[in-house]
Image (cartoon, rainbow, N blue to C red):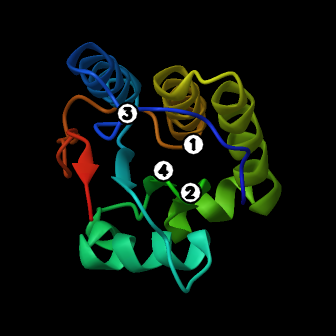
């Protein structure tokens, strides 16, 4: 999805915002066996943002979660491209329209230059869906994927 331009320095997020995002991921994952990752890069040239998200999803082997319930938020900052991609387990539960809804909320925040808040809103939304369909089970759940932000090229 192409989003409207925003202004941000080359680092995209300051240290406080980075911590806010990581904390949002941890909070969302406390209530679910699902996994949420965030991938940020400058450019998404020569391909659609969803295709790039699929490529990153595969590169980081996010499909290896036990219940196939990993999700990826992808943002190409300078090209103003975003995508949300979910593995087959969660996608079968929520459907295509759900991903559009998550993106729309995130984009609304981005339009107001609230990048970290937009990402956190998407994380919270994903966390709710994951909690609904894949609730946390203390005897079996483990954090299958790292929570930190991945910064690409």
Closer to the camera: disc 2 or disc 1? 2
Which residue ends up furthest to the bottom in the rendered image?
46
Which residue carries the number 2 mark? 90
Instruction: Give the mark nearer the N terminus: 4 vs 3.
Output: 3
Judge from the rendering whether residue 18 lies leftward or rightward of residue 107; answer left or right.
left
Closer to the camera: disc 1 or disc 3? 3
Which residue carries the number 4 mark? 77
Check the picture and name the quadrant holding the N terminus. Answer: bottom right
Instruction: Give the mark nearer the N terminus: 3 vs 2.
Output: 3
The local secondary structure at tag 4 comes to loop
Residue pictured at 67% horizontal, 56% vertical: 93
Judge from the rendering whether residue 55 lies leftward or rightward of residue 127; answer left or right.
left
Instruction: Give the mark nearer the N terminus: 1 vs 3.
Output: 3
Disc 4 to disc 3, C-alpha distance: 10 Å
Which residue carries the number 3 mark? 9
Instruction: Give the mark nearer the N terminus: 4 vs 2.
Output: 4
Residue pictured at 53% horizontal, 20% vertical: 117
């Amino acid at each position: 999805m192409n989003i409207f331009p925003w202004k941000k320095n080359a680092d995209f997020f300051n240290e406080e915002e980075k911590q806010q995002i990581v904390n949002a991921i941890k909070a969302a994952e406390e209530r679910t066996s699902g996994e949420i990752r965030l991938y940020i890069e400058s450019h998404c040239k020569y391909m659609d943002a969803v295709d790039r998200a699929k490529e990153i999803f595969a590169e980081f082997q996010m499909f290896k979660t036990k219940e196939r319930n990993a999700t990826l938020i992808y943002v190409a900052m300078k090209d103003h491209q975003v995508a949300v991609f979910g593995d087959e387990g969660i996608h079968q539960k929520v459907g295509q329209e759900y991903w559009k809804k998550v993106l729309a909320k995130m984009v609304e925040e981005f339009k107001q230059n609230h990048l970290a808040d937009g990402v956190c809103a998407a994380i919270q939304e994903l966390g709710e869906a994951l909690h609904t369909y894949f609730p946390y089970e203390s005897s079996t759940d483990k954090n299958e994927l790292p929570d930190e932000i991945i910064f690409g090229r």
